[in-house]
Image (tube, rainbow, N blue to C red):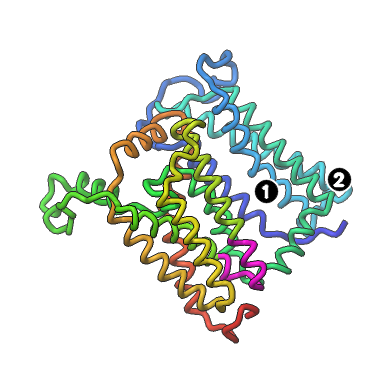
Amino acid sequence: MIRHKTSAWPLAGAYAVLVVYASLYPFTGWRNQEIPPWDFLFAGWPKYWTGFDVAANVVGYIPLGFLLALSFMRRGNVRYFATHPNIAGIAVAVLAGTALSLLMEGIQNFLPSRVASNVDFGLNIAGTLIGAVAATALELGGAIDHWSRFRERWFIPEARGALVLIALWPFALLFPAAVPLGLGQVLERMETAIGEWLEDTPFIEWLPMREVELQPLVPAAELLCVALGAFIPCLLGYTVLRSAGRRAVFAVAAVAIGAAVTALSAALSWGPTHAWAWLSLPVRLGLLFGVILAMLMLAVPRRGCAAMLLLALVVHLSVLNQAPASAYFADTLQAWEQGRFIRFHGVAQWLGWLWPYAVLVYVVVRISRREAAPTIAE
């Protein structure tokens, strides 16, 4: 099998950074317990654990093992492992995942909000192994090459940035949003944080803080936010897809995935029985309106879609950030930030806050580039 160089090494490195962030969040209250960092390896079975903790520790390391093994196997030069690169890829991935998990669990001894556990350590290794074996199976079965050919047929060559943003969108939706599909609502929290930092300084009077109590979004504004929240990822895909037919398939899939992930987020936040409680009449109409807008843009050239995406982002963020978070929503965030979701909520939270602004930067750069012809194929 001929192996080609791949860009999975940077992805593996980026994901390792996310693992570090999720493992050490919230990075406050450091203290020295005067015990060896590796003492957790010889501790007994933890008194408090849940099925969610088990799943989070396994699932969190699966992508790391997958990317590490894939990166190693598809290198242009495997040198010392030319005869058994697949086995070597699994071994390298598991060793790297083991070292990272050991380091993270050891450092958690110095954080009061985290508990180092040999069970977590073993589950992390298991997740890395699962990801590495999955990468090996897909490589041997030719699935990675099929994906490469699929990408060439469906997307333009310069699609990497948009594809990364599209892949991150469902993860950003996992963090609870005051409005379904409403990512980027940061103004209220920024004002509160800045006000607390500058409370006892004269600089507090320099800031244009909003003193009027904000009113909840009216149903029409909520409908607009939901519609634009569904429309924006569709437009992002349109900027890199090759044909109108593929755009239509992508739009339907994107809205369906967005609804499914939002339901999963609601189930994690309020319980499985409330998974679809967010699907009110304005939200249902907003999803439908978003799909209609996406269908109307099927034949628009990519630069036109990028310009429309920029407009949609500005309107969406402007309307969304004029709405306050309800007290019930604030309680939900407290459960995420201080309860069992602390293992990964920080990553999801930052994705939910920053995703639309990252898309905004991407679109500005995209529009600034010169394209040969204003057609879908160019």
Corner quadrant of residue 111: top left
Placement of the N terminus among the 4 image quadrants: bottom right
Q: Which residues are magenta?
A: 237-251
Farthest residue toward the bottom?
Answer: 372
Q: Residue at x 85, y 59 (%)?
A: 2
Badge 2 amino acid: His
Give how far apart the Cα atoms at labels 1 and 2 are: 18 Å
**Where 201 falls versus 374 (above or below)?**
above
Residue at the spot 74% in from the left edge and 62% down from the top edge:
148
Mark number displayed over residue 67: 1
Residue at image point 70% right, 64% down: 151
- Mark 1 surroundings: few (<14), some (14-19) or many (≥20) residues within 10 A: many
Q: Earlier in the sequence, mark 1 or mark 2?
A: 1
Q: Nearer the viewer, residue 17 or 299?
A: 299
Q: List x then y, in percent, for residue 124.
A: 62, 32
| 145 or 154, nearer to the observer | 154
Secondary structure type for disc 1: helix
| Mark closer to the observer (1, 2) | 1
Instruction: Classify the position of the C terminus by image quarter.
Output: bottom right
Task: Please give the residue where the numbered disc 2 appears in the rendered image.
Answer: 84
